[in-house]
Amino acid sequence: MATIRLETDDDAARDDIVAWRGGVRLAQRLTRVAAPGHGAARAIRADGAYVVTGGLGGIGLVVARWLLDGGAGRVVLSGRTQPDGDRAAALAALQAAGDVAYVAGDIAEAGVADRLVAAAEQTGLALRGVVHSAAVLDDELITALTPDAVARVWAPKVAGTLRLDAATAGRDLDWWIGFSSVAALLGSPGQGAYACANAWLDAHAAARRAAGAPVVAIDWGQWSDVGLARALTMDALDPISPAEGREALDAVAAGTVVGGVPARIGVARLRLDRAAAAFPELLRLGYFAPLAAELAGDDGDDWPGPEALVAAGGDRAGELALERLQRRISAVMGYGGTAAVDPDRPLTELGMDSLMAVRIRNAARGDFGVEPAVALLLQGATLRDLAADVVRQLGIPAADDGAGQDGGDVDGESGPAAAQAGSLRERSRQRAAARQRAATRRKTGQHT
């Protein structure tokens, strides 16, 4: 869950999401929360009607079944087109299990949301809940995004939300749940438009909650078997099963009925160890500081920092760089061990794509303070090529160059290699100090 709080500790300088409100500095950080408690509260009423957008998508069908199994009096699903094939069969199965109607139309278009609400109330039951799960995914690097691509992704999340808000105005809802994405919570390479659209939905939920509406946004992680992300490989996340998704949805909806659930809550199976291996830069961002503190001192990572390469020099520096890069690249590419990354085989032949190349570059920057060019990665560079490039950028002379020749003594007081070593040692000291502060907070319970 993302929380906003006044920031006063020594890590404030690392904060990357900051706002000033009435002269008060606020920082947003990612924190764990316990599952919402709801006691005997029920999320679903037998005398209530419910609307589900994106209702014949994989997750929409799970939600519809959750409502019917919970005893919903009436469920109205929406989708862009009339169902056929497997979707028609799925709709028929739901209609055999309860009072289920379907309304075709793009939720972002005028009139569709009004027809949904009218269909929900057609039998005389009051509308009690809305699940807005409609979404469009269109992966593109940020530099390749076009206005049309952004508009396609934004339409269901933004325009659809506003249409539903207007159509449900004045209804006594128990809950209004927007399905957001972990892309807005953690970030996701290649999904800039999607992450931004979901971040808008998160902010909208917060604004509506502040105005007194029972609105919540759930930032879902990857689901198994269903959903837009089911076919994706996500290093930092393990998938949520449909049963686990239903359980979380029930807790959030019921918790919203009685109050106490935040306006934005993430539901994801985050693997901090893999996230840190694949995205080492996140551990230096204030937003992730509470989670980074969980790993500090416990991650089993004995990487001494780039200064060890400078101290080793020559061929040994290359070996250390190769070993570290092999570990990082294996994590980025989703391999279970380092043996799959042949040092002498082009990374493109091992399955590396442009998004992976960007992440490998960022990982190298986090580990070494220098970075290989993405173009080098995409033009057939091997792991050994990358290690040699890192060593070169650090100004470390080859073993037969001799220390101090044309570049100063690495262990002396002058020369580019010595200057680089001093900078690296300073960064190492800063990292060690940050890890110590995090460990102290963890032990004393000062982090949130």
Image: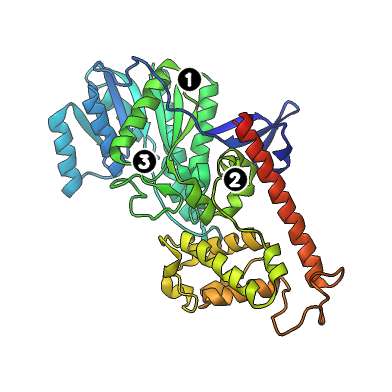
Q: Of tags 2 and 1, which is closer to the observer?
A: 2
Residue 14 visible (yes or no)? yes
Within the image, what quadrant is residue 139 found in?
A: bottom left
Residue 97 location in percent, x, y?
15, 29
Left or right, 56 with respect to 1, comes to: left
Residue type at numbered disc 2: Gly
Residue 42 location in percent, x, y?
32, 18
Residue position marked by numbered label 2 in the rendering: 297
Residue 447 location in percent, x, y?
62, 32
What residue do we see at 12% from left, 32% from top? 96
Q: Of tags 1 and 3, which is closer to the observer?
A: 1
Residue type at numbered disc 3: Ala
Quarter holding the C terminus is top right
Q: Which mark is residue 260?
A: 1
Q: Of tags 2 and 3, which is closer to the observer?
A: 2
Residue position marked by numbered label 3 in the rendering: 134
What residue do we see at 35% from left, 49% from top? 228
In the depicted structure, whether residue 323 falls above or below residue 147:
below
Residue type at numbered disc 1: Gly
Give neighbour class at mark 3: few <14, some 14-19, many 20+ (Cα, 10 Å): many
In the depicted structure, whether residue 382 falls above or below residue 193:
below
Q: Are marks 2 and 3 in contact (CB under 8 Å)?
A: no
User: What's the CA distance linking mark 2 and mark 3?
Assistant: 42 Å
